Amino acid sequence: MKTIGVLTSGGDAPGMNAAIRAVVRTAIFNNMKVLGVKRGYNGLIHGEIDEMDVASVGDIVHRGGTILRTARCQEFKTPEGQKMALDMINHFGIEGMVVIGGDGSFRGAQVLSRMGVPSVAIPGTIDNDIACSDFSIGFDTAVNTVLDAINKIRDTITSHGRANIIQVMGRNAGDIALYAGVGGGAENIIVPEIPFDVDDICNRLLEGKKRGKLSQIIVLAEGVGNASEFAKIIEAKTGIEIRETILGHIQRGGNPTSFDRILASRMGAHAVGLLRDGIGNRVVCIRNNSIIDEDIEKALSMTKEFDKELYALSKVLSI
């Protein structure tokens, strides 16, 4: 394989640029040509495609977002859109694709592979909801962004003797809430994967207040509900003054952490190695700190395991 394409799709994640850089430079090192597709599958359909070289990925390893831009594309879900994309792939002489994104992006890579275009998917999503991989690109950065917010919020609520409920992203996954909550010493962590009891949360807050705690943090995963509604319920039950903070898209931006830059670099290089050898229909994963690849059909059928041991530890440490 001598000519490959690379695109980013779905929600952006810190570290995507590091992955693009790794794809481009590893391919060039292996005497392969790389074409960058702008705005995801939408750009693939409409021919927003340019050749990339070593210089085009300079000074991006530390930048958040994606230089290729991203978009969600309903058109690619139709047979007509898929045919248009395949026509563009053939027109530009693309022999294989690297797709960086979440599970929706992976389904697009699956479609391309089924149409005869070997494709390799790289997990790039802050949600960390890709079942086949321990971590996805952008997750560590998002956790550290939330952790920084927890530190700052605790400073101010300590001054007032308040509690704060912090709503974090993650779609239907609670990993951001769990990891940031444990790292930030949250008194309560509410995630979709574990049933919760509002009365138990209230009792823990009241016990903390009785012991003289000046600040209490509740981290709420967005897949469970809205922070404002929870705040009203908890304040009514406990009488503790509580504020809510919805962090929103600040979690998707910013300079990627060292972990995400290295993970992205390793995954990008591995993806190119697969295509160089003519192998497609794969997802690049990290398991036990080893970069491996999984059949995309199998990867999409897997269920993400929530770290119940870490959640149980959070209960112990937050007494």
Image: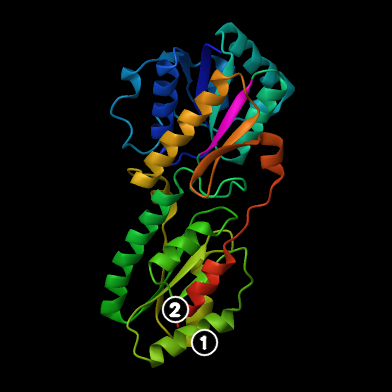
Q: Secondary structure at mark 1?
A: helix
> Disc 2 vs disc 1: Cβ atoms closer than 8 Å?
no
Residue at the spot 63% in from the left edge and 25% down from the top edge: 280
Residue most extreme to the bottom: 210
Residue 183 visible, this angle = yes
In the rendered structure, does residue 119 fall within the stretch colored magenta? yes
Is 125 on the left or on the right of 78, as rendered? left
Nearer the N terminus, badge 2 or badge 1? 1
Give the label on residue 280, or none: none
Q: Which residue is mark 1?
A: 203
- Answer above or below: position of 298 versus 144: above
- Answer above or below: position of 215 versus 94: below
* Residue 243 image-quadrant placement: bottom left
Image coordinates of residue 169 in percent, x first then y, are 49, 55
Q: Which residue is mark 2?
A: 318
Is 101 on the left or on the right of 24, as rendered? right
- Number of numbered labels in the structure image: 2
Main secondary-structure element of the magenta-colored stretch: strand
Magenta stretch, residue numbers: 118-123
| Residue type, numbered disc 2 | Ser
Image coordinates of residue 255 in percent, x first then y, are 32, 43
Q: Secondary structure at mark 2?
A: loop
Instruction: Quote the CA–CA distance across marks 2 and 1.
Output: 13 Å
In this rendered view, identify the residue nearer to me: 271 or 237. Answer: 271
| Residue type, numbered disc 1 | Asn
Residue at the spot 44% in from the left edge and 78% down from the top edge: 318
- Answer above or below: position of 289 versus 268: below
